[in-house]
Amino acid sequence: MKEKIANIYIIINNNIIKGFRAKEYIISGTDEEKVNHLMENSKGDFEIAIPFDPPMDNKGNYMKYRSFAKLAKRGMEHQLFENIFVDLDLPEKPLICVTPVVDGKIISK
């Protein structure tokens, strides 16, 4: 069954989240095959991925990566990707691969 999936990048400079990027695919296969596809393409996708605004508080301050990591520990980081999910028309609980880009370096597994 074909499914829309995405590589999502968190752009981190000096421990501050400066933006997101995302690249979508529509592919079939098992979840493992889909995850492998995303991971294999994570480095090449970054340059062609669509940019998205970073999370900011009501004072216009960027989010610190430490705050993001706390959300991730509670499984709540997807809240920050909501505009990406909507813009890319991803399913309700999309299969994604999140890759940090720290000070210009893609940190892939």
Image (cartoon, helix red, strand yellow):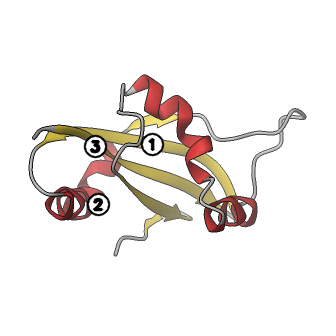
Q: Residue at x 52, y 54 (%)?
A: 10
Q: Is residue 80 left or right of residue 1?
A: right
From the top left corner, tell me how far across and down residue 84 is, in percent: 47, 33
Q: Nearer the viewer, residue 60 or 82?
A: 82
Residue type, numbered disc 1 = Arg
* Marker disc for residue 21: 1
Under circle 1, the secondary element is strand
Q: Earlier in the sequence, mark 3 or mark 2?
A: 3
Q: Residue at x 66, y 63 (%)?
A: 74
Q: Is residue 100 left or right of residue 73?
A: left
Q: Is residue 97 visible?
A: yes
Residue type, numbered disc 2 = Lys
From the top left corner, tell me how far across and down residue 59 is, in percent: 90, 35
- What residue is disc 3 on? 5
Q: Is residue 104 visible?
A: no
Instruction: Tell whether label 3 touches label 1 (CB within 8 Å).
Output: no
- What residue is disc 2 on? 43
Q: Is residue 102 left or right of residue 34?
A: right
Q: Residues within 10 Å of mark 2 (few under 14, many from 20)?
A: some
Q: Is residue 107 above or below residue 71?
A: below
Quarter occupied by residue 53: top right
From the top left corner, tell me how far across and down residue 105 is, in percent: 45, 67
Instruction: Tell whether label 1 touches label 2 (CB within 8 Å).
Output: no
Mark 2 → mark 1, Cα distance in angstroms:
12 Å
From the top left corner, tell me how far across and down residue 64 is, in percent: 75, 58
Q: Nearer the viewer, residue 72 or 10?
A: 72
